[in-house]
Image: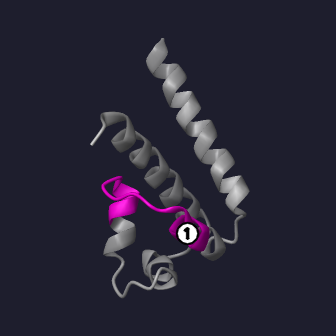
Amino acid sequence: MKAGIEKKRKIIGKLLRSIRRTKDITQSQISSALGAKQPAIIQRVEAGTRGLDVAELWEICQVLEMSFVEMARQIDELIKKDNEKNEN
């Protein structure tokens, strides 16, 4: 897998973890919304070792009570900042 994709997964995972913790939502609650019985799926997403498809991210946004557009904006901002940092 491309190194850039792995790095982006880690950035997204850290963002999801931060928002989830701020809202006091458990990994189990998010896993349940995705139809998983164990929180391992979210643990891997937050660690950046598993990606999400658009439908999964949309479901996570619903649990976090956050619009998909706002989540996408924050992801875009963080990835752009990371790219700028690496260019310098």
Q: Is residue 74 above or below residue 52?
A: above
> Residue 76, how many percent across, how many down?
61, 41
Q: Is residue 17 magenta?
A: no
Quadrant for residue 28, please give it: bottom left
Query: Which color scheme did the rendering employ for the protein?
Result: one colour
Q: Residues in magenta?
A: 44-60
Q: Is residue 86 above or below residue 44?
A: above
* Quadrant showing the N terminus: top left
Lateral position of residue 41 relative to residue 76, left or right: left
Quadrant for residue 38, please give it: bottom left
Label 1 crowding class (10 Å Cα cut-off): few <14, some 14-19, many 20+? few
Name which residue lies at 44% across and 74% down.
27
Name which residue lies at 36% across and 77% down.
39
> Residue 20, how many percent across, how many down?
55, 66
Lateral position of residue 62 relative to residue 16, left or right: right
Q: How many marks?
A: 1
Lateral position of residue 26 relative to residue 65, left or right: left
Query: Element at badge 1?
Result: helix
Most foreground residue, 84 or 20: 84
Name which residue lies at 40% across and 69% down.
42
For label 1, the residue is: 55
> Residue 56, how many percent across, how many down?
51, 69
Name which residue lies at 68% across and 46% down.
73
Q: Is residue 38 above or below residue 87?
A: below
Q: Is residue 55 magenta?
A: yes
Most foreground residue, 34 or 78: 34
Most foreground residue, 61 or 3: 3
Please state which amino acid type lies under the numbered disc 1. Answer: Ala
> Residue 50, how many percent across, how many down?
34, 59
In the current view of this chain or complex, which residue is farthest to the left? Answer: 1
